[in-house]
Amino acid sequence: MRTPVRRLPSSTIRKLEGTLFFTPWIVGFLLFMVFPLGYSFYMSFHQVQILATGISFQYKGFYYYKYILFENADLLYNQLIPFLRQAVLMLPIIVVFSLFTAIILNQNFWGRTFFRAVFFLPVIFTTGQVITEFITQGEGNLDFLERYNLSSLVVTYLPPSWASPIVAVLSSFVLVLWYSGVQILIFLAGRQTISPSVYEAARIDGANPWEVFWKITLPAMLPFVLLNLIYTTVDLFTYPGNPILTQVNTTDYGRSSALAWIYFAIIFVFLGIIFFLFTRFFRGVKPAGR
């Protein structure tokens, strides 16, 4: 007499199939994210030496953290403070430019798809070393800035602490705007979530384009503004030419690891400040027609 074959319930089979599909992601996440992060954190407390016999670790405690934060300003503060000023200038430029470009690209006109591709393609082609070389060669300059010598005016009439980051932004202004493709894409997606009936109702009520923008479009786009602020902040702070990241190298693994973790904490705090100010400033603003 044959023994009946016991089959697993269909719900269990679905769970096993799901687990099988996301197992490669878990393995990759553990190997390429969790392990390097944990190893970097471990190295930040040690002096690391690469020897012929292997890797040598000598425990140093919080030495590297104290050295970077309190003893050597060249490693962090002399690079970080000018960069933070530059980031404060670049953030609103990129977000505002992306918002208005997305609104224009959302209009119905001939060649709209082509122009959308024009704004997004630089994100693909000008990554990493390519965009760094463009900035180094001065390809991001605006001709009229040099023609009217605006950089000299900025240096003359502004304090040096702010003149330097403003000149740095102006010297790479085209590439900064060119690097806004992802933000434009996010705003385009956000703009298309607003129902056309809301705009139609506003036109029937006699609202002009200026009122429509401030009372319908902008309030509805606020979640996407916050998303783009966060994305742009992370993008700027991990930029290939970032002066802090250039200090993270292989000359001293322990010191570089400690600097990387301190820099991570600074980014986290900066994002927290942006989130706090944004939610506090726009508290109570509700989009129409949602």
Image (tube, rainbow, N blue to C red):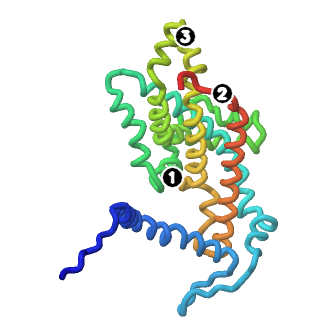
The image shows a total of numbered marks equal to 3
**Alpha-carbon span between mark 1 and mark 2:** 39 Å
Residue 164 visible in this rendered orientation of the protein: no
In the image, residue 54 sits, relative to residue 290, either above or below, namely below
Task: State which mark lies toward you, 1 or 2.
Answer: 2
Q: Position of residue 143 (x, y in %)?
A: 52, 33
In the image, residue 211 sits, relative to residue 217, either above or below, namely above
**Numbered circle sitting on residue 285:** 2
The secondary structure type at the circle numbered 3 is loop
**Alpha-carbon span between mark 1 and mark 3:** 43 Å
Residue 200 visible in this rendered orientation of the protein: yes
**Numbered circle sitting on residue 208:** 3
Residue type at mark 2: give it. Val
Q: Position of residue 241 (x, y in %)?
A: 56, 55
Residue drawn at x 65%, y 45% is: 87
Q: Position of residue 133 (x, y in %)?
A: 48, 52
Residue type at mark 1: give it. Thr
Residue type at mark 3: give it. Asn
Figure quadrant of the N terminus: bottom left
Q: Nearer the viewer, residue 185 or 56?
A: 185
Res 122 quadrant in image: top left
Res 266 quadrant in image: bottom right
Crowd around label 1: few <14 · some 14–19 · many ≥20 (10 Å): some
Q: Are marks 2 and 3 in contact (CB under 8 Å)?
A: no
Q: Position of residue 174 (x, y in %)?
A: 51, 38
Crowd around label 3: few <14 · some 14–19 · many ≥20 (10 Å): few
Residue drawn at x 68%, y 43% is: 274
**Residue marked by disc 1:** 132
The secondary structure type at the circle numbered 1 is helix
